[in-house]
Amino acid sequence: MVNRDNDEEDVQIEECVICGGDIVVDEFCEEEDMVYCNDCETEFLIRSLDPLRLEPMDIDPDDDIDALDDRYDEDYS
């Protein structure tokens, strides 16, 4: 888990749409860079930095998000 009280000004933290974990976008990231969720390791493409827009890379847009979330619950069973 990322410390959200960190004093670093140029770090943005986004919530993962799959598991609710933290996606850290630091000051060195640029548009079209890859970042990932610290919990489920889903990869995201940075589409925009201002405002921050991330696009999941390994998700079929026709998939049900709730069904995808279930696959991560199996890892912890």
Image (cartoon, helix red, strand yellow):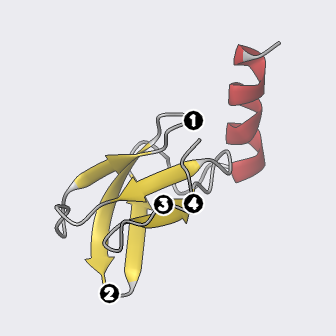
User: Under tag 1, what secondary structure?
Assistant: loop
Q: According to the image, label 2 marks what residue?
A: 50
For the C terminus, the quadrant is top right
Dot 1 alpha-carbon crowd within 10 angstroms: few under 14, some 14 to 19, many 20 or more: some
Residue closer to the observer: 64 or 38: 38
The picture quadrant where one finds residue 49 is bottom left
Percent coordinates x, y for residue 41 in the rendering? 47, 34
Amino acid at dot 4: Arg
Percent coordinates x, y for residue 58 in the rendering? 42, 42
Percent coordinates x, y for residue 54 in the rendering? 40, 66
For the N terminus, the quadrant is top right
Q: According to the image, label 4 marks what residue?
A: 4
Residue located farthest toward the front when viewing the structure as drawn: 7
Are the residues at dot 3 and dot 4 in contact (C-beta closer than 8 Å)? yes
Amino acid at dot 1: Asp
Q: CA distance from mark 2 to mark 1?
A: 24 Å
Q: CA distance from mark 1 to mark 4?
A: 15 Å
Dot 3 alpha-carbon crowd within 10 angstroms: few under 14, some 14 to 19, many 20 or more: few
User: Under tag 4, what secondary structure?
Assistant: loop
Q: Nearer the viewer, mark 1 or mark 3?
A: 3
Which is more N-terminal, label 2 or label 3? 3
Q: Nearer the viewer, mark 3 or mark 2?
A: 3
Residue located farthest toward the right when viewing the structure as drawn: 77
